[in-house]
Image (cartoon, grey):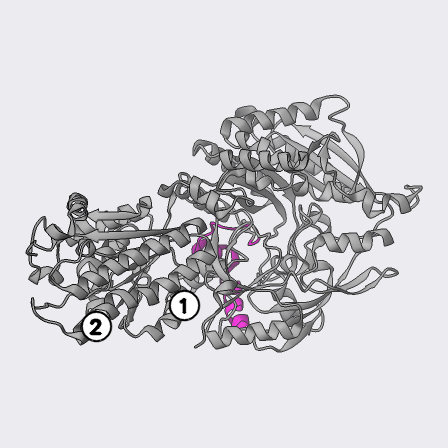
Amino acid sequence: MAVLPIDHLEKIEGWGGAVSSFGYIYRPTTIEGLREVFQLARENNRHITFRGSGRSYGDGAIGAENIVLDTSRMNRILSWDPSTGIITMEPGVTIEQLWQYIIEDGWWPPVVPGTMYPTIGGCLGMNIHGKNNFKAGPIGDHVLSFDIMLPSGEIKTATPLSDPELFYSVISGFGMFGIFTSITMQMKKVHSGLLHVKAWTTKNLHELFEVYEKHIPGSDYLVGWVDCISSGPILGRSIVHQANYFKPGEDHNPAQTLRVSKQMLPDTILGIFPKSFVWMLLRPFTNNKGMKFINALRIFVSKLPIIGAVAYEQSHAEFAFLLDYVPGWKKSYGAGGLIQYQSFVPKENAETVFCKQIEMCQDAGMPPFLGVFKQHKPDKFLFTHAVDGFSLALDFKVTQKNKEELWKLCAKMNDVVLANGGRFYFAKDATLRPQDFKAFLGDDTMKKFAELKKKYDPDNILQTDLSRRLISNATS
Amino acid sequence: MSHVLVNSKHIIIGLIIFPSSLPSATPFAKSLFICPMSKKWKHAIVIGASGGIGEALVYELASQGISVALVARRKEELERVASEAAKRMSEGNSATRNPQPATRFPIFVHDVTHFSEVPVLFQEITKQLGGLDLIIYNSGIMPAVAKDEYNFEKDRSIIETNLLGAFAWLNEAAMRFQNAGCGTIVGISSIAGERGRRGMPAYITSKAALTTYLESLRNRLSQHGVSVVTIKPGVIDTPMSKDAPTKMWIYSAEDTAREIVQAARRGVTVKYVPWKWRIVSFVLHSLPSFIFRKLNF
């Protein structure tokens, strides 16, 4: 057995920075390069972990002592047809590259996450959703076909009709079956570079659900920011943002608004203060009292006339990529990083579950510093996280001191979610236990997973820290 | 000029307030600011783990919930120690989340004088452990040497085990840790290496050389965030010391292991076990050679 070169060894973190491991990183640029990495893994008896931009919050794109196959250099757009909106690209193309490539032709990715930096391959592996999941479904619903290289080196093509088993399992399959080599997707036609945006402030969580019920039918996008520190009658007070596309002809000069330069997020606040410094200012506030103040301030500002405007126009990028407004904001959480706990609960139980979750966090002295609320609809993908209901994503600061208690708190919240028919999301997860994984996927999906793994990756070469944490233990 | 000022300010403020999270901070700057107490070990290797101090070290680390790879020549002894370590881990640490602690103490039968095996074995161990935070080189032999004995083969085997084996293993660890920007290396040297006494010239030389080697590693690696800890035990109650010329301040292997792990966590550079030997060391170093050579030990 050969020895892997030490200069490929790197500490690789989950995006939240709370989990990390060392892996031997390889960044191929071609399909031949991919084959060589698979061959290297076989020769050295190593496992392989796929990684795009490393934007999964937890351990979905890290693999201790594995060969970590980073696809970020396989980032070419292979074909683009502006008349139909069909694009073919390599897996390392980022959402940022994608929207900047197509927007001036009047197209926009049909589903985008809250940040523009993930790769398309990573987005499909986790089958990400956006603020329009209730309407547009997950990103996988907009894939027309893909090519995938299996660990054996064989390349297979799948469409929803030609090979539904492969199609619906690889998308959502968190990198357990093979690596995308090309992806063909249908983009969404837009008639302006702007969106109509409206905002509502709600008094509490109950009112948030009411606002959603009222406005979902007329929304293209709908997202709620939830203050998880307030309690009592104002528990779960929130700000809801709705965005709708412009209708054809509504924007008199779409060529102007569709320019990439008109979409870019500003580098400064109020034209003066550089955003790259903002995380430093936030750092003194990333504690319970500080965030209570920030949240109260946010609610206060949202109610101010003019500043807290309830209806305005905003570019696609400005509305979609809220997480990119403050560069490096996660550093404000300190050296321990953060985790995001996101659970998906059927609509009939969602209010009770989310209310209970917030109370549990507050009782444990670890209120989430950020809460994001969305509505979802079920989809056909094998490892789907979506339900006919709602999700609440909660950000927690991780420290050496609170880590063990925080993981226990998440485990308790898991029990509540599972008892109410809820699900979880691998792009975010860092804390699920094997029994939670088994419970939310169910026996049939677990069995199907084992069958597919045997079929496409019989030597179990593809592993991540997440899969080891959840599957190796769940099946042993 | 203003550009320089802004950058300097940025770095200074960053280092003072956010030393460990600022990506632009150099490893050296990080090593100055990061609290050594923050060392969080999950994976360790103990070379020379089948008895004595090595065995006690495995138990000490196991009781703290750390996975340990055990390396030594004697398979049966390794199996015994691994099994006992698994038991102690199950009984001891509540932080242990792994339901199968037995798998957390893999054993590797290896003779440290088989230097060419080390690179492959080192990678296999780190793979099986799932990482590496701490390596302890504890292998050593101290065969009895008569006052008038000059046996080259015996001397060579001492140097190969006590010194060259350490080079083979710790060089591998040094390369990994330097690249990783973190890690802890512990070498078990000895108080015996302080001066060139009459007894056991090769053993004394091996320990003196090991001490110097570890100091050199420390000077190379500290700027990369890696700790190198030299342990200088006195007389420890182990099979190796049963023929030791003196039993002064004899110390148990368990207490020794506990002090070693504590010292390594604190990032101590040189640790005498027990501490009283530091005074002896000072005295020994202070003695002029014409007096020292008259001492009968």
* Front in this rendered view, residue B160 or A46: B160
Q: Chain of mark 1?
A: B
Quadrant holding the N terminus of chain A? bottom left
Residue at 57% x, 61% y: name it.
A174
Image coordinates of residue A265 in percent, x first then y, are 74, 41
Neighbours of disc 1 within 10 Å: few (<14), some (14-19), many (20+): many
Residue B232: in magenta span:
no
Q: Is disc 2 in the same subunit as disc 1?
A: yes
* Front in this rendered view, residue A404 or A282: A282
Q: Which residue is mark 2?
A: B157
Q: Which residue is mark 1?
A: B123
Residue B46 against residue A156 in the figure, above or below: above
Image coordinates of residue A359 in percent, x first then y, are 49, 33
Q: Chain of mark 2?
A: B
The kind of residue on which mark 2 rests is Ser
Determine if residue B129 is in view. Answer: no
Neighbours of disc 2 within 10 Å: few (<14), some (14-19), many (20+): some
Image coordinates of residue B123 in percent, x first then y, are 41, 68
The kind of residue on which mark 1 rests is Gln
Magenta segment? A426-455
